[in-house]
Image (cartoon, grey):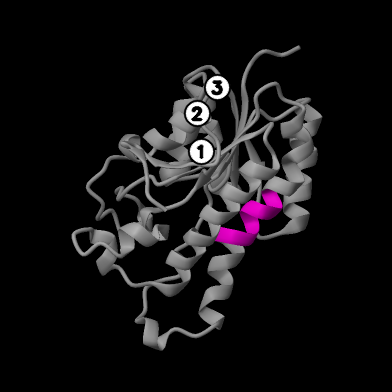
Amino acid sequence: MNSTTIALVTGANKGLGHETVRRLAELGWQVFLGARDADRGKQAAAEFAEQGLNVEFVHLDVTSTASITAAVDTIRDQATRLDVLINNAGISGGFMPPQDTQAADFRAVFETNVFAPVQMTHAFLPLLQAADQPRIVMVSSGMGSLTITSDPNRLESTLLNLPYTSSKSALNMITSQYARALPGIQINAVDPGYTATDFNAHAGPQTLTEGTDAIVRFATIEADGPTGGYFDRQGAVPW
């Protein structure tokens, strides 16, 4: 049996996803780089391959059931299992005053940030359950924490965005529910922290490496590690 750890990272042609792919591949893992933009995804995978890393592009639009099904087929054709699924793909939906926000403004954000991780998890369960120690990392945000966003001393309390914040709160509950329903899989939510990416016009003070610390930590946890938790690079995050 192939002993190489096999992982899939969504939204991985740039930013946190791209850095996560790099770090996991440097551990000697076989990493599938999932991306909606085929050209950028293929280019990113090719650059990693030139560095001698075992990275392969898989076309993946996480908002499309057909695309997810095709990705499952692609990975099943090359591997008998999936050890680690990292649901990283996410969008902010833009920032607008809550009083100007309408129900329609939630739809695209929830499609990517909430419905997609559920569909991805459901579709890849058979491959995950074929692994000896399956792990799922849900990339959440401190902006999904009711405690943090209610703390006037935290930056997150000043950032008002109904769709994005509520989508990450929903993802946190989804993580908790899955972890209790699937005790054979370690499932955790992580807050990367305020990291310099296209997501925030590179305003974040953290480097990409710092921003992926929690993601990598929970992708690589031991079999006796936690499940059903919410963490950043410093430790547990309050719900």
Report the amino acid beneath label 1: Ala
At 49% from the left and 41% from the top, the residue drawn is 229
Vertical position of residue 17 compared to residue 37: above or below:
above
Report the amino acid beneath label 3: Asp
**Foreground residue, 113 or 218?**
218
Residue 48, labelled with which disc?
2
At 30% from the left and 68% from the top, the residue drawn is 159
Q: Position of residue 179 (x, y in %)?
A: 62, 42
Vertical position of residue 93 compared to residue 24: above or below:
below
Q: Position of residue 91 (x, y in %)?
A: 48, 61
**Foreground residue, 81 or 224?**
224
- Front of the two marks 2 and 3: 3
The range drawn in magenta is 113-120
At 45% from the left and 31% from the top, the residue drawn is 216
Mark 2 or mark 3, earlier in chain: 2
Q: Quadrant of residue 31?
A: top right
Membership of 59 in magenta stretch: no
Q: Position of residue 24 (x, y in %)?
A: 49, 26
Q: Where is mark 3, residue-wise? A: 224
Magenta span main SS: helix
At 73% from the left and 41% from the top, the residue drawn is 124
Q: Where is mark 1, residue-wise? A: 44
Callout 3 crowding tier (Cα within 10 Å): few <14, some 14–19, many ≥20: few
Callout 2 crowding tier (Cα within 10 Å): few <14, some 14–19, many ≥20: some
Report the amino acid beneath label 2: Phe
Q: In screen coordinates, is 23 left or right of 121?
A: left
**In 3D space, how far apart are the residues under numbered discs 2 and 1 (Cα atoms)?**
6 Å
Identify the element where label 3 is drawn.
loop
Q: In screen coordinates, is 80 left or right of 134?
A: right
Contact between labelled residues 1 and 2, with CB atoms less than 8 Å apart: yes
